[in-house]
Amino acid sequence: MSEIIDTLFLRTWWSWIRADHAPISGIDYACRLFNFVEAGAWFTFSALVLLRWSRNRRSHIELWYALAFALFGISDAIEAWVLTSWLLWWKAINLIWLFLLRRKVMKQFYPLAKVF
């Protein structure tokens, strides 16, 4: 049972800092760079949603939407250093939250748009 809990919630799958001082490969550098770029994209989305909200102030849902984007960006910045089971859960829950918020925003402000 403790092995299942460890795998689902506590395991570190990858870390930038190696306990055994193993060399860092080119793939590690590429993945790390990708995570930082991805974090920047999520922060940009968050800033754009906040900008739209500051101009129109249509709904406080947009503030939650911006927060969800920012939290996803933070999770990608953390992933550039370490990838753990709890971080994967955080990202999964955050992604579901983003989809639910998008659905709510689309239905409320764009009722004629198709929402899949």
Image (spheres, grey):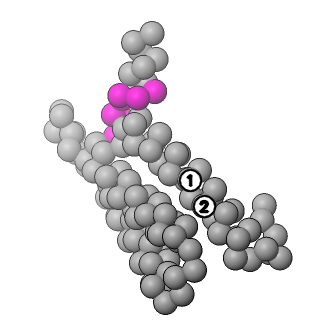
Name which quarter of the figure residue 85 lies in.
Answer: top left
Q: Nearer the viewer, residue 24 or 84?
A: 84
Element at label 1: helix
- Per the rendered image, the range of residues in magenta is 8-14
Residue drawn where x is 67% and y is 63% of the image: 104
Q: Nearer the viewer, residue 94 or 55?
A: 55
The amino acid beneath tag 1 is Trp
Q: Nearer the viewer, residue 106 or 7?
A: 106
10 Å crowding of disc 2: few (<14), some (14-19), many (20+): some
The quarter in which the C terminus is drawn is bottom right
Q: Position of residue 75 (x, y in %)?
A: 38, 54
Instruction: State if disc 1 and disc 2 touch (CB < 8 Å).
Output: yes
The answer to whether residue 57 is above or below residue 66 is below
The residues bearing labels 2 and 1 have C-alpha atoms spaced at a distance of 6 Å
Residue drawn where x is 35% and y is 65% of the image: 36
Q: Which residue is mark 1?
A: 97
Q: Position of residue 35 (x, y in %)?
A: 39, 60
Q: Report whether residue 38 is seen.
A: no
Name which quarter of the figure residue 27 lies in.
Answer: bottom left
Q: Which residue is mark 2?
A: 101
